[in-house]
Amino acid sequence: MNAHDENILARGRVATRLPAQDLERARRFYSEVLGLEPVDERPGGLLYRCGGTEFALFRSAGAAPGTFTQMGWEVDDLDGVVARLRQRGVTFEEVDVPGLRTKDGIADIDGNYPSKGARGERAAWFRDSEGNLLGVGQPVV
């Protein structure tokens, strides 16, 4: 294997895939609640783009695990985003586990990746119409 072969995935683009038992219900949630419209679609799938990346919702008979964050957005104004989403009916998860506790739906997290140049992060989590656990976070500099 040469150096070119070792980095083959590092050059690829990463995209999230989220299951939806009811694709039309999911489309309405992402449109009406999150304000996102698909940029493309195919039978059984909807493609979205946000900030230069993409994710897809796909029709699936399986249930979303919802036990971990499946996708997240990094935002500049977490309080503003949370407030706007609450106005649209989003309920944020309350978490109280060792090392992670939310207050009014928002957690203060110590530490961050050194390459991000932040000392921590503030974050909040909510579920979409299909049970997928989604997050929003803001680096603390």
Image: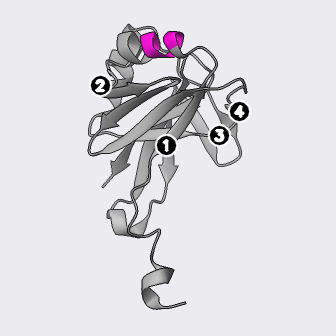
Separation of residues labelled 1 and 3 (CA atoms): 14 Å
Q: Is residue 8 above or below residue 56?
A: below
Numbered tag placed on residue 16 in the rendering: 1
Residue 27 shown in magenta: yes
Please provide percent x and percent y for residue 98.
Answer: 71, 46
Please provide percent x and percent y for residue 48.
Answer: 36, 31
Residue type of the residue flagged with mark 3: Phe
The residue singled out by tag 3 in the image is 68
Q: Secondary structure at mark 3?
A: loop
Quarter of the image with the N terminus is bottom right
The residue singled out by tag 2 in the image is 80
Q: Which residues are magenta?
A: 24-29
Labels 3, 2: front one: 3
Q: Does the rendering let one see residue 28?
A: yes
Separation of residues labelled 3 and 2 (CA atoms): 24 Å
Label 2 neighbour load within 10 Å: few <14, some 14-19, many 20+: few
Q: Secondary structure at mark 4?
A: loop
Please provide percent x and percent y for residue 132.
Answer: 60, 28
Separation of residues labelled 2 and 1 (CA atoms): 25 Å
Residue type of the residue flagged with mark 1: Thr
Residue drawn at x 30%, y 28% is 39
Q: Does the rendering let one see residue 106?
A: no
Labels 2, 4: front one: 4
Q: Nearer the viewer, residue 83 or 62?
A: 62
Q: Is residue 32 above or below residue 106?
A: above
Q: Nearer the viewer, residue 132 or 46?
A: 46
Mark 3 or mark 2: name the one nearer the start of the chain: 3
Q: Is residue 47 above or below residue 140?
A: above
Please provide percent x and percent y for residue 141.
Answer: 30, 55
Residue type of the residue flagged with mark 2: Gly
Mark 1 or mark 3: name the one nearer the start of the chain: 1
